[in-house]
Image (cartoon, rainbow, N blue to C red):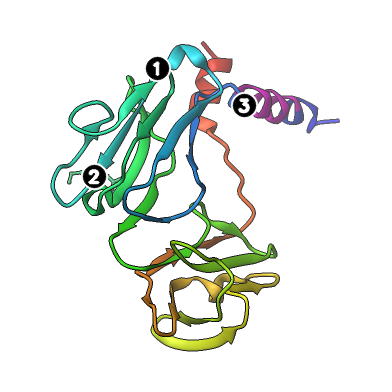
């Protein structure tokens, strides 16, 4: 069986690559859009607690700014923004001391009357995508949904579900609630099945 050593190598590589340090950023409430004056908690969920992840963000005002440095209150591996303001809008990510980064998340904080709740992370192809259009007081008013500025449809209870998403569902979504207003737009991305395989670092671990 000539392929046996190769299979072992692949097996070892797969096992070792699972130990590569990663962190994922979670947001609570889990929404890419938030009203102002709300509290939001962001956490770096790490699989190696020794790695010391910090949360950073880019806004229009400041780049690469760390939680606690003028915004947010660090609380362990989390960062809490007590009262959101529109200039908290931006891209957020976790970063280790070694410079490894998590996937980043876009958050829009609006002073307007309507938000669109969409997933903060990419949706997998084949999954369902649910978008919710809400005002500060209600999340079940009739709402119109738009993708890339084209009207899709009105949903009587403010929720639109797209079943079995494909790449073509990727785009910039927004919603409107009549006589209340329009949400900011948010990008929804759709990804294929993810295979993360850090071959180089695993290879080095085997042969050193
Ligand atoms: C944040 O801003 C810096 C400086 O402009 C840029 O190099 C970096 O790619 C940005 N990070 C993200 C995740 O957008």
Left or right of 146 on screen, residue 57: left
Left or right of 177 on screen, residue 47: right
Q: Depth check: 67 or 206 in front?
A: 67
N-terminal label among 2 and 1: 1
Residue extent of the magenta highlight: 8-16
Provide the residue designation for mark 2: 58
Which of the 4 image quadrants contains residue 53?
Answer: top left
Identified at 46% across, 11% down, the residue is 50
- In the rendered image, residue 79, in percent from the top left (x then y), is placed at 37, 29
Q: Crowding at label 2, few (<14), some or many (≥20) Cα neighbours within 10 Å? A: some
N-terminal label among 2 and 3: 3
Numbered circles on residues, count: 3
Q: Depth check: 54 or 203 in front?
A: 54
Q: Answer whether labels 1 and 3 touch (C-beta < 8 Å).
A: no
> Mark 2 vs ligand 1: CB under 8 Å?
yes
Is residue 155 magenta-colored? Answer: no
Is residue 9 magenta-colored? Answer: yes
Q: Relative to 11, does residue 192 appear above or below in the rendering?
A: below
Which of the 4 image quadrants contains residue 18?
Answer: top right
Query: Which label sits on residue 52?
Result: 1
Helix, strand or loop for disc 3: loop
Give the Cα distance between marks 2 and 1. Answer: 20 Å
Q: Residue furthest right?
A: 1
Provide the residue designation for mark 3: 18
- In the rendered image, residue 83, in percent from the top left (x then y), is placed at 31, 41
């Amino acid at each position: 069986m000539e392929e046996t050593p190769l299979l072992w190598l692949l097996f070892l590589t797969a096992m070792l690559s699972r130990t590569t340090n990663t962190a994922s950023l979670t947001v609570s409430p889990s929404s890419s859009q938030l009203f102002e004056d709300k509290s939001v908690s962001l956490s770096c969920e790490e699989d190696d607690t020794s790695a010391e992840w910090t949360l950073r963000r880019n806004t229009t005002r400041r780049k690469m700014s760390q939680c606690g440095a003028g915004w947010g209150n660090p609380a362990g591996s989390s960062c809490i923004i007590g009262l959101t303001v529109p200039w908290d809008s931006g891209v957020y990510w976790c970063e280790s001391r070694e410079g490894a980064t998590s996937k980043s998340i876009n958050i829009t904080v609006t002073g307007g009357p309507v938000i669109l709740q969409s997933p903060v992370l990419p949706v997998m192809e084949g999954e369902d995508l649910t978008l919710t259009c809400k005002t500060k007081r209600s999340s079940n008013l009739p709402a119109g949904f738009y993708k890339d500025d084209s009207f899709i449809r009105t949903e009587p209870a403010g929720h639109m579900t797209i079943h079995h998403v494909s790449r073509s569902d990727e785009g910039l979504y927004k919603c409107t609630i009549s006589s209340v207003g329009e949400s900011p737009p948010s990008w929804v991305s759709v990804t294929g099945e993810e295979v993360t395989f850090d071959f180089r670092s695993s290879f080095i671990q085997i042969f050193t």
